[in-house]
Amino acid sequence: MKWFKHFSDSLDDPFIQSLLDKFGAKGYLAYFGLLEIISKENGNKLTGELQIDPAYLRRKLRISYGVMTRIFHHCDVAMKLSGNFQKDLWHFSVPKLLELKDNYTKDLQVSRNKPSLEEEEEEEKKYIKKKSPSNGQFKKPTEDEVKAYCNERKNHVNPKDFINHYETVGWMRGKNKIKNWKACVRTWEKNAEPKRKGDDWTWKN
């Protein structure tokens, strides 16, 4: 993760003030230092969980075992994290950290979870094979249906041009009757030019 949200009024937070009261600057360092380490170790697959060698954590934070243990126990009691402190392996869980993900990381996770074009086409083929009536009749889409599908995919296909083209050729592709107009839209989107309105990819009349 590139960064996590560190609110500018953190020093006014009662929990942070309690850390400073009890442990001084080391309390502040240990808490936010741990959040940084969890963010770095998990990368883009942020879970809020971390298993770490306490010796490594001590070297990173420059705080003794005893003081670290007391600080993180204080955080545990305040329900800011939960910790399990074994001799050679400490386990932390900070579920709230997931709420502090930067927008870059959120967008990257969404894009990585989005199925590829080939996967979408394969899924749609399976769906059509399962749901299509036995007579295989094709129903022409309306312009609104094409527009909604193009907006959903955020592509650059002009719905009106798409409809006009296939009306002209009798909803044929080459010598074959079109069976799935959405597949045709996906083919068009590879070469279509965008009609940009700010950052919002939508087609208007």
Image: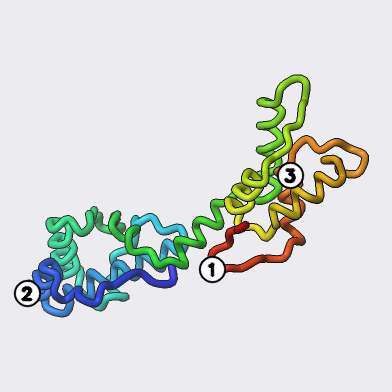
Residue at 41 percent across and 58 percent down: it is: 46
Q: Which mark is residue 21?
A: 2
Q: CA distance from mark 3 to mark 2?
A: 63 Å
| Image quarter (top left, top right, bottom left or bottom right) of the C terminus | bottom right
Query: Does label 1 or label 3 sit earlier along the sequence?
Result: 3
User: Which residue of the protein is positioned furthest toward the right in this rendering?
Assistant: 175
Quadrant that contains the N terminus: bottom left
The alpha-carbon separation of the residues under discs 1 and 3 comes to: 25 Å
> What type is the residue that disc 1 sits on?
Asp
The residue type indicated by label 3 comes to Ala
Q: Position of residue 94 (x, y in %)?
A: 28, 57
Circle 1/circle 3 CB separation < 8 Å: no
* Numbered-mark total: 3
Viewed as shown, does residue 125 lie left or right of 69?
A: right
Estimate the spatial distance between the alpha carbons at disc 1 and disc 2, rounded to whole Å: 47 Å
Viewer-nearest of labels 1 and 3? 1
Of labels 1 and 2, earlier in sequence is 2
Q: Tell me: residue 102, above or below residue 162.
A: below
- Tell me what residue is drawn at x 77 percent, y 27 percent: 137
- At horizontal 57% and vertical 68% (from top left) the residue drawn is 197
Q: Estimate the x, y position of residue 129 in percent, counting from the top left.
A: 71, 28
Q: Looking at the rendering, which quadrant does residue 90 occupy?
A: bottom left
Who's the residue at 13% across and 74% down the image?
12
The amino acid at mark 2 is Asp
Instruction: Judge by depth and name the residue closer to the eye, 78 or 117.
Output: 117
Q: Is residue 56 visible?
A: no
- Disc 1 element: loop
Residue bearing mark 1: 199
Q: Which residue is mark 3?
A: 183
- Pointer 3: residues within 10 angstroms few (<14), some, or many (20+)? some
Against 124, residue 96 (above or below) is below
